[in-house]
Amino acid sequence: MVADATRPYLVLGAKGALASELLGVLGCLCTGLSRAELDITDAGAVRRCFDARRPTWVINPCAFHRVEDCEDDPGRSFAVNAVGAATVAREAARIGAGVAFISTDYVFGGESRERGRPYTELDAPA
């Protein structure tokens, strides 16, 4: 990646393990935003942030992922993992930014790997 000082790359969820690692590797190419700085479940905040920062790329490893917490609070899980992700994608597209979502294999049971193909958004969780 080549940094564009007028349209920075954003890494969301900056205090999470994966985002912290990305920021460590990418250094000055990215600006990290923690959940306290940008809650992706707040569509208005995402819009205002993207309008103000005009990122070229948004890297979104944000997830509500602890299995027990997701089972106890499926509404929060859906708000972050589905609605929040869709908000990031929609707002990035609106301003012409690319977006990269990073997920884990915790969502799926491993069958796709056995069939030799990557997972898609249409695969059933397991």
Image (cartoon, rainbow, N blue to C red):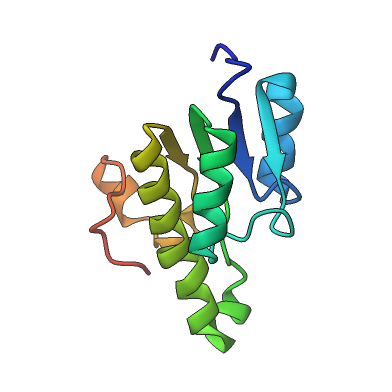
Quarter of the image containing the C terminus?
Answer: bottom left
Task: Give x and y (percent) for residue 118.
Answer: 30, 42
Identify the residue at the far bottom of this view.
Answer: 72
Quarter of the image containing the N terminus?
Answer: top right
Instruction: Write the residue at 51% across / 74% down.
Output: 77
Q: Is residue 15 above or below residue 44?
A: above
Q: Is residue 107 left or right of residue 120?
A: right
Which residue is more in the foreground, 59 or 4?
Answer: 4
Task: Give x and y (percent) for residue 27.
Answer: 74, 23
* Count of marks overlaid on the render: 0
Q: Is residue 70 left or right of residue 5?
A: left
Residue 60 in view, yes or no: no
Instruction: Write the residue at 48% across / 72% down.
Output: 79
Instruction: Write the residue at 68% across / 23% down.
Output: 26
Task: Give x and y (percent) for residue 87.
Answer: 42, 57
Task: Give x and y (percent) for residue 42.
Answer: 54, 65
Q: Quadrant of residue 52?
A: top right
Which residue is more in the foreground, 124 or 19?
Answer: 19
Which residue is more in the foreground, 59 or 9?
Answer: 9
Residue 53 in view, yes or no: yes
Identify the residue at the far top of this view.
Answer: 2
Q: Is residue 24 above or below residue 76?
A: above
